[in-house]
Each structure stands twice: as structure tokens, then as C-alpha cells.
Amino acid sequence: MLAGVKRTVWLLRKRYRWDEVLSAYLFLSPSVVVFSLFMYFPILYTLYLSLHRWRLGKMSRTFVGLHNYQVLITSSEFWEVLRNSFYYALGSIPLNMAIALAIALLLNRKLRGMAVFRTAYFLPTITSTAAMAVVWLWIYHPDFGLANWLLDIIGLPRLRWLSDPRWAMPALIIMGIWKGLGYNIVIYLAGLQNIPQHLYEAARIDGADSWACFRYITWPLLTPTSFFILIIAVINSLKAFAQMHIMTEGGPLNSTTVIVYYLYEQGFKFFNLGCASAVACVLFAILLALTVIQFKVLSPRVHYLGG
Amino acid sequence: MFRKLAVPLAIAVLLAASCAPVSTPTPTPTGVIKLEFWHAMGGRNGKVLEEMVARFNREHPGIQVEATFQGKYSEIAEKIWTAIQAGAVPPPDVAQIGGAPLFGETGALVPITEFTDGPNGIDRTKIYDAFWAYNTADGQIWSMPFNNSMPVLYYNKDLFKEAGLDPAKPPQTWDELVEAARALTKDADGDGSIDQWGFNTTSSTHWYLSAMILQNGGRIINEDGTRVLYDSPEAVEALQFWGDLVNKYKVMPPAQHKGAKSDFLAGKLGMLMASSASLFGILEEAPFEVGVAMLPAKKARVAPIGGASLVIFKGEESKMNAAWEFVKWLTSPENSNYWAMNTGYIPIYKGALQSPQMQEFLKENPLYKTVVEQLEYSYGIPVFSELGTSDTELRKAVEKVELGAATPQEALAEAAKAVNKALGER
């Protein structure tokens, strides 16, 4: 924001023609209006609501200050919910990124029919979560599901998957990885294709093997891509909701109640909108903090291709 | 110079115009009143409803009802709640909601008695009292009973025969339920895991547990709707029985209600407790002979009614009157019978069973007869302000007991505590 203002002032100082500046702002105005209407206003309104008690039926809200936040922080349930969310994030992100990178490396070749594979990996990403969740409900069926059939084949004991509080979250993580893979593969592929071939050719001449090429060329030059994927993945995994809503309803025994599901439950099952807004604000704060930390810690380690 | 600004200016102006509140009503042919009707009937029952709406529109050229499916009860309640409170979208003129009287407090509804008791009204005494109870909050009847159902026990007659049970004699009591379920539970391939379960329920476990609590002489809520009463010994006993089905007799899989209906249809489940409104859907899909029985009894035979009701929102006089015309038509004795006979919901009029159409229908659909006979034992659990919280807490209590995370006593005490706390805060 500030940078924008400074730049405008600078532009004006340089005596840019005022009509050009004005037309730039006019071109920007639609998106500014849309953003304020659908992003900034709801965010501020949520903050405002989080300071009130507001329940179904009551048309009036009572200002209660930080009461809703106090209730959240002192409830053991909310901490459990936070733990579940981080379990989901930590369980899915590293694996997802590793598998996505491995598959992207495999797909980054000039082979016949590669387009077919690339499409196949991308399919889960464009499938609606709701439709997918219904199919996975069957895969995880304890008695006749595909997952237990596979366990039978490799001689492992059957699991009760979504009906077992210990396994419900891993089950959702597996599905989440499957679902999120396609998107990350595409991003990684784009990153891989941005790496100039001459670097590999030079390395080969110097006698570098495949591992060395990966370690010293591919990986460092993919760090901007990985960084981007990580930030998006952290945000997305903490925002996970649809699969919990459809497949487990937060159960069994709250084991899959993640932040957004909790928010939904407070807001639309208990019609406790003040509390739900407070949950939303806490989530916003967590995501903001995590993103800032990631930028601070990881940015110095990201290698951008010079030039 | 100004020519350059023309395009962005045009965009900005257009945008500003599109943001301005739209006040011009959609032009309609003179005299036709358009009504928006939100409903929660998907699938088979949704088609029946839409067909009825089309018929209403044909018979009433002055009123045009536009019916939109808005998702299940919880989703429609969310949308209406958002519409009323945030004013982001206008609420519809008529809607079908579960727990309808709770919306009375918002001030957005017209109490239905203003119409039923008005000049164009109906004789309210002709409808079963339980339905009015189901539509009352704080002594005021807010909504019109429309689609009501009761839990019933579906069973697979083929599996009954296989297990050496008499398909003409479904379980009548809790003890008989256990007995039949035990005979039906099988590990056919002997690998140590069950391939056929004796008994299960769909995911509305709060409803079935409430039924059992009532059957055991317990109560759900006190007279003035200020305290839930399911931490009583009768209720604990009911949940204990539920838990025993899972952990002692091992005839019901733990925490697996979501797939219960599909399991039943696939012939992997002997008995299913589900809503009577699923009757025709189940009959259509089941590749085996289906049986329907009343809920097994304990101290008494009780079946709590569930379902949703029709509400009319405040608006222009002419619209509200047209809305009532529609509601009245949809719930008229003939149409409510038609609706019942095509969906498995229960008829709301006392005389409904004596009507010749219904008699004819019962002859052809003997299974529906059980549903209708159970009407005699129907019970309207009073609607109270924290009904949604209570349902969720009861489902959690059931889950805890099924998974052995709490005793029935602990689980129900915790549930009652949470709900009573919420009730106290209002």
C-alpha cells in the first residue's frame, strides 16, 4: 500500500501526464472495489463480530469484548482442534511435496504419451472434493473397501479407517495427498522447465552424475518453486474442510475436527456466530504468522536464477 | 486526451451501476404473483415435490411458485439464517425448514396461525396434535406441518430366512432385537472379520437414541424447554443398550452409520433403523425382499416424529396471502395424502387413513401400513432453542460409547451439561 503511494508520488514528480495516472487508477478501480467488497470488508466485519455474542434467533448482538477469545483459549476442545489441524498439515505437506517432486521429475521427459500421464496426475485436482469424498468413503469402507483389500493382499491387518479415531486423520491425509498432488506436480514441472539446459550440459562435461546434477542444479534452482508450494500448501491444509464435512463430520471422537470444521460447527450447527467469527480471526492470525515466519526463515535460502 | 480515459471511465461507471441496489422489480405479466420457495427435498422425493409445485402453478394462474432445492435441512437453515441476519440475500417467500419454530424468534416469520385461523383458514383440530407440538415454540405455532417422518425398522427378509428367522415376525422388543441381530451377524469366510452385520442405524443417531430414551420412560427436555433431561437413569440405560449392541453383543459395527443404508441395500446388513421417508427409495433400490417393522419397544412403544415444516416470511400483503394459498394447497388433505403416498412421509390429517385412495394404496403397499400404524405411537419432541446443539451432543455421546471412550453415564452427563450451559446463556 505504502509502496504504491510512494511510487505514485514519484510518478507525479517525474511529471507523468496526469491523465495517464488517472486512467491507471480507473483501470484498477474495478478490482479495488471488488476486493474491498468481497475481501476487506468481510474480514473487518468478522473481526467486529468476533467481539459480540450473537446467537440464532436473537436479532440483536451484545458486545462482549474479548470474551469469545477467552472461551476459545480456555477450552481444551479448541486446543485439540488446533492440534488436529497441525497434524493434518504436517502429515500431508512434506509427503505431498516429496511425491510431487519425484513424479514431476519422472514426467519431465520427452517421451511419447507423456501428455496422458500429465493429465492423469492432474485429474484428482480438478475433481470436486465432494464427489471425490463420496468415492473415498467407499475406498475406506471397513468391510468391503478397496483400502482394506489392499492391506489384505500385502498381509497387513485390516483397519477401521474412518470409524477409528486413530486412523481417521491418516486416512484423510492420504486422500488429501492424492488430491493435492496434481497441482503441485504442475507447478514443479513448470519450475523444472525453467531451468536452462546448458547448466546440465556444463555439469555433465565436468563429470557430474545424475545425483550431483539434482543436488547442485535442480534442487537449488527449484527452491523458488518449493517455497511457493510450501506457502500455498500450509494455507490450504489449515483451511481443509470439505472432506471432513462430508466424510467424518469431525469424528470419530473429534479426531478430525479441524479449525474450519470447528468454525462451521460453532457457526452453523450451534448458530454461535460470535464464537465462529473469533475462530476465523484466530485462523487468520495463525496463517499470517506462519507466512511471515516462512518468508523470514526461508527467503534467504531461496535461489533465484540470476540474470 | 479525454478519449484515452473513455474506456476506464466506462468500466468504472458500469461497475458503479452494477453495485447500486436493484430496485426495479422483475416485470411480470399483470396480476401474476411470483413466489420463491426453498425446499430441502433432493432425489426421489424432490421430484415428487417439484411435480406438485408444477401442478399448483397450473391450477393457479395468478400465482407462480418457483421451487429451488437448497440442500439438506442444515444447509437450508444456514442459508435462511444468513438471509435473515445478514440481509445479503432476501429470504424466500416460503421455505421448508427443520426446527422451523426456532426461526420465530427472529421476527422474520408470520406465525402460521394468522393464516390457519383467518378467513381463508383451515380446521386445525383435524391435524394430529403431535404435529402442532412439533411446530410450536414459546407457546406460539409458527409453521405448518408438511413432511414428517418417524424412524422405522427395515429388515432384509432374505437374510432373515437364511438366518433361520421368521420374516413375518420382526423383533417387537429390545430383547428380540438383540436376538435377531445375533442370528444375522456373520463371519461367512471365517477370517475373523464380520461380513454381515445384524443391526445398524443411519447417521441421525440422536433421533434413534431419543426414541430409545422415550421407549425406556425417559424424557428429552423439561416442560418449559429450559433443561434437557437425558442424564436420567432411563436415558443412561438406553445408551447402555446401544453400547451393548456394539461392544457386548457385537452385532453393530462401531461408528459406521454413514454407510449403513448402502450396506443394507447391498445385503450386508440385516436390520436398519432409518426414517420412514426412505421407504420408497429403499424399495426401489433393494434387490431383495424388504420388511418394515415398528420400532422395537421397551417399557412403551414410542416413535418420535421428525421432518420439516413450511414457514411463510413477512413481506407484502399480497405475497403473504399467495404464499398461504400455496402452503394451504400443499398441505390440504388430498395433497398431503398424495405427498405421503409418494414419499413415505406420514399423513398429517387424522382422517387420512380412512380415505378411499389411502385404503387402496395400503392394499397395494402393505409395508407402508406399518408406518401408518406406528402413527398411533407418534410423539412430538418439543422444539427448544438449542435443538441443534442437543442433536450434535447426543450424536457425540453415542459415538463415545460405541468407541468405548466413555461410559453411557459420563457421555450423557457431558452432553446434558453442554446443552444446559448453552440454554442457560440465552
Image: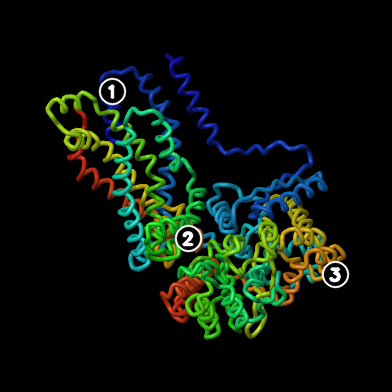
Image position, residue B184 (x, y; %): 59, 73
Which residue occupies the extreme left position in the image?
Answer: A206
Crowding at dot 1, Cα within 10 Å, few <14 / some 14-19 / many 20+, comes out as some
Which residue occupies the extreme right position in the image?
Answer: B356
Residue A246 visible (yes or no):
no
Q: Secondary structure at mark 1?
A: helix
Which residue occupies the extreme front position in the image?
Answer: B189
Q: CA distance from mark 2 to mark 3?
A: 43 Å
What chain is tagged by disc 1? Answer: A
Vertical position of residue B235 compared to residue B100: above or below:
below
Q: Secondary structure at mark 3?
A: helix
Question: Of tags 3 and 1, which is closer to the observer?
Answer: 3
- The residue that mark 2 highlights is A249
Crowding at dot 2, Cα within 10 Å, few <14 / some 14-19 / many 20+, comes out as some
Residue B11 visible (yes or no):
yes
Crowding at dot 3, Cα within 10 Å, few <14 / some 14-19 / many 20+, comes out as few
- The residue that mark 1 highlights is A11
Of B146 and B397, which appears nearest the observer? B397
